[in-house]
Amino acid sequence: MRVDVVTIFPDYLAPLELSLLGKARAEGRLELEVHDLRRWTYDVHKTVDDSPYGGGAGMVMRPEPWGEALDTLAKPHTRLVVPAPTGVRFTQALAHELAVEEHLLFACGRYEGIDQRVIDYASARMTVTEVSLGDYVLFGGEVAVLVMLEAMTRLIPGVLGNADSLSDESHAHGLLEAPMYTKPATWRELDVPEILRSGDHGRIARWRRDQALLRTGERRPDLIADLDPATLDKRDVAT
Ligand code: 6GU
């Protein structure tokens, strides 16, 4: 997968060199380039923003640098992703969807956002998705890009050492994952649940499923409401 990121703060994306993301890059599974939006400004102050038409607080990013950035970086199969609190929610499902794209172009807005005409112009030429991490406001899209790329990169085949960790994890089945334990069996007088040490894989799977349902019900009732009834069994309904 090819990824381009356009931002006025390229240094924010420095962590992309590290850890599993850096490894995915080093192995050629992820080809990533970060671009400074000011490269496409021509005045001495490298201006990227201006006051909003119609008034109001804050500044809006001017369309011209963005237009040139998209002209330069867009390819025939580019999907443009614009992080913004006004976007659709970023979910594991959207991470899966983005992870199979040929080319992603992230446009990081700052201030009160990017002039809407940039989005409208791009929408006539490529798939554009405005994406929000959640119901709160960040200064800009850079941290959101870090989050989205990390979620997506670990879905690329071969990036995770153990592919099983993808099928069991939280959100894989619309539920939060059950609590996990490792050695020692007793720690500060706290015991690992006996059932996990029983070796009875059927009962262990059932216990984990119950724990996942209980935990999800307590913490994320919205996820329970979204569950597909076809994925529930009789024992689930009793829980
Ligand atoms: Cl993607 N961007 C900004 N600026 N704020 C956000 C967000 C994104 N997601 C939640 N809040």
Image: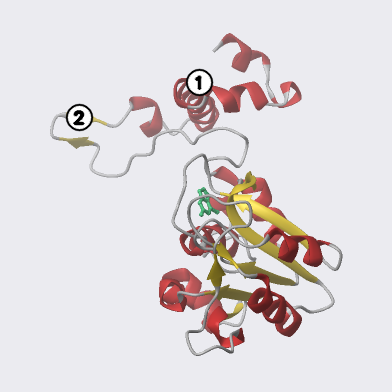
SS state under label 2:
strand
- Residue 184, by quadrant, is top left
| Residue 112 x/y as whole percent | 53, 56
User: Where does the N terminus fall, quadrant-wise?
Assistant: bottom right
Residue 87 lies, with reference to residue 230, above or below; the image says below
Which numbered marker is on residue 190? 2
Residue drawn at 56 percent across, 32 percent down:
175
Q: Nearer the viewer, residue 14 or 228?
A: 14
Residue drawn at 47 percent across, 21 percent down:
214
User: Which badge, 2 or 1, is on the more N-terminal residue?
Assistant: 2
Total marks placed: 2
Whether disc 1's CB lies below 8 Å from ligand 1 is answered no
| Residue 33 x/y as whole percent | 58, 82
| Residue 181 x/y as whole percent | 34, 39
Marks 2 and 1 sit apart, C-alpha to C-alpha, by: 25 Å
Residue 190 shown left or right of residue 125 in the figure: left
